[in-house]
Image (spheres, rainbow, N blue to C red):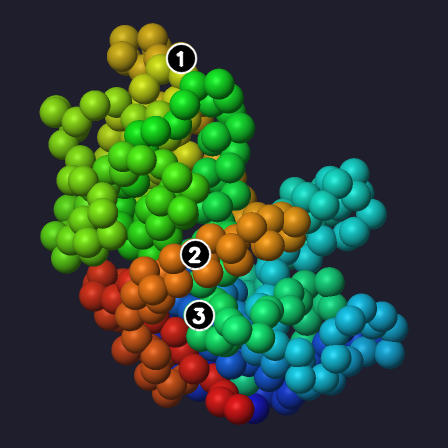
Amino acid sequence: MLAASFMGEQKIALVDKEIPAIKSDEVLIKVAYTGLCGSDKRLFYLGTPVVPGHEISGTVIQIGVDVNTDIHKGTRVIVYIPLYCNSCNECRLGNYNRCENISGLIGWQVPGGYEEFMAVPAGNVIPIDDDISLDEAVLLLDTIGTPGHGIRMCIKAIGDNVAERALVIGCGPLGLGSLLVLKGMGIKEIYAYDPNVNRLHLALDFGARAYDAERSPEMHIVIEASGQEVARQMALHAVHAGGAVLLLGESSTPWTIVPSPEIRRKDCFYIRSFYFPLKEVKENVSLFKDNRTEFNKLISEVGSLKEIERMHIDFCEGKTIKPLVKLSVD
Ligand SMILES: [Zn+2]
Ligand SMILES: [Zn+2]
């Protein structure tokens, strides 16, 4: 089978690899689509010995002998990336994204979806409804699942304070996904900020208002979805007392909180969330189905594995939102 090898310095080679043999608790997936993610950028620049790609959909084609769930050959699935133990306290509560013995992430420590076939623990595949196609299904992961979980944590944190105003900083796939999730959750006034005018316009098309740090009111929920230091500072400034800042954006730069008088006197929450628990999938599917047309606008391009290097270059330059690599078609 073909797999992508991230060599570093923005080079991706296609290599031949054996189709993986599955263990007794695993299934073999024929990968359909894998979405590009902002967190792939580091791997694109620095290289990695593991096949990346962690926003994956596909079809189950082989099942391990010890798998006794309702997964069968032909089940269409998306892939849940944390390799969880299923026995610690957090796993028992269904918080697999908080597993105390997490042994890695698919697409990071073990091979991901930029290859044609992959072996996945049966507990890491999520069957999808018949009326969801394999391309749009990818959106249920980082684009809806990740912000959905973080925003639920914000709403829980701020409690009795009504969350009626929210700001999204950074209008890439995560930011625009956040915006649509906020909308789906009934947040009335949503503001957006991005120095990239094209991306900001997408947010405005989805009904957001342009944020102005001087003039806009303070926000009950602020989502930092860029990973940029300047955006993180903007988020701390924008939050209203009693509100919550959700730090979702990824980068290697430290999160810095400068204890200025303004920041010291804020009575608010700073929240970092990671991925999502499986128990939220049903609700995320509803969010998607309620606003499918707008969510699907985030899929900006579908290309083949041969185009993967060029697709990453365009993505890093901010030219695309959620490009999908198409690995196979049925
Ligand atoms: Zn991602
Ligand atoms: Zn666990």
Lower position in the chain sequence, tag 3 or tag 1: 3
Q: Is residue 73 left or right of residue 130?
A: right
CB of mark 2 within 8 Å of CB of mark 3? no
* x and y, in percent, of residue 37 in the image: 40, 61
Q: Is residue 48 above or below residue 267?
A: below
- Disc 2, SS: helix
Q: Nearer the viewer, mark 2 or mark 3?
A: 2
Q: Amino acid at mark 2?
A: Asp
Disc 1 is placed on an element classified as: loop
Q: Is residue 138 above or below residue 31?
A: above
Q: Do tag 3 and tag 1 residues touch (Cβ < 8 Å)?
A: no
Residue positioned 36% across, 36% down in the render: 187
**Which quadrant would residue 215 be assigned to in this image?**
top left
Q: Secondary structure at mark 3?
A: helix
User: Could you tell which of marks 2 and 1 lies nearer the N-terminus?
Assistant: 1
Whole-percent x and y of residue 118?
62, 78
Tell whether circle 1 marks a residue whose Cβ is less than 8 angstroms from ligand 1: no
What's the residue type where badge 3 is placed? Glu
Q: CA distance from mark 2 to mark 1?
A: 34 Å
Question: Circle 1: is it few (<14), some (14-19), or many (20+) Cα within 10 Å?
Answer: few
According to the picture, the residue beneath numbered tag 2 turns out to be: 290
User: Where, by quadrant of the figure, is residue 256 drawn?
Assistant: top left
Amino acid residing under circle 1: Asp
Q: Is residue 201 above or below residue 298?
A: above
Query: Which of the two residues, 289 or 315, is positioned nearer the viewer here?
Result: 289
Per the image, the residue denoted by label 1 is 267
